[in-house]
Amino acid sequence: MKIALIGLALLASVPAHAQFRKPEDAVKYRQGVMYALTVHHDSRIGRMAMGRIPFDAKVAQESADFVAVLARMPWFAFTPDTDGVGRTDAKPAIWTEQAKFKELADKSQAEALKLQAAARTGDLDQIRAAYRSSAAACKSCHDAFTNQ
């Protein structure tokens, strides 16, 4: 798993122009990252935090490690040439309100790191609190910049 995290981190550090040959590739990339982030890892922690599935400290920590990496990854793929490309929930405001978009993206990343730190404690109460803050940060960005 650590190798996968290192690989994801390295991929996240590659400039967008070197990463995508077509705008459609950038859209697919960021959608794939968001899917893995929300459906596979963040939601697993959320279900534990809400008592919907049994709490497993090891699984929570592993998922939080992925959340921390994945939360860094989609932002460079939101390039102006992807505005209106493909089937996407992205609002045009992403490209007209770049400062606000960056601020909310940075907040989401910071909250993901706090969630990771909480998960490393193995304390469900700390994880719950961090998860609520992380989910609120994600929601604020989605509310402002997606049609979801």
Image (spheres, rainbow, N blue to C red):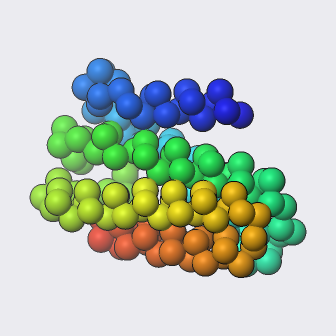
* Image quarter (top left, top right, bottom left or bottom right) of the C terminus: bottom left
- Where is residue 66 shown, x and y percent of the image? 61, 46
Image location (x, y in percent) of residue 118 = 64, 65
Residues 33 and 83: in front is 33
Q: Is residue 128 above or below residue 17?
A: below
Mark yes or no: residue 126 visible: yes
Question: In the figure, is residue 92 to the left or right of 118?
Answer: left
| Location of residue 124 by image quarter | bottom right
Q: Does residue 92 appear in this view?
A: no
Please name the residue shown 43% across and 70% down the image: 137
Q: In this view, which residue lies farthest toward the right? A: 54
Query: Closest to the observer: 117 or 21?
Result: 117
When asked about the image quadrant of residue 110, the answer is bottom left
Residue 74 at what x, y percent from top left?
Answer: 40, 44
- In the rendered image, which quarter contains the N terminus? top right
> Is 103 rendered above or below residue 40?
below
- Taking 137 as reference, is 79 above or below it? above
Answer left or right for 98 relative to 8.
Answer: left
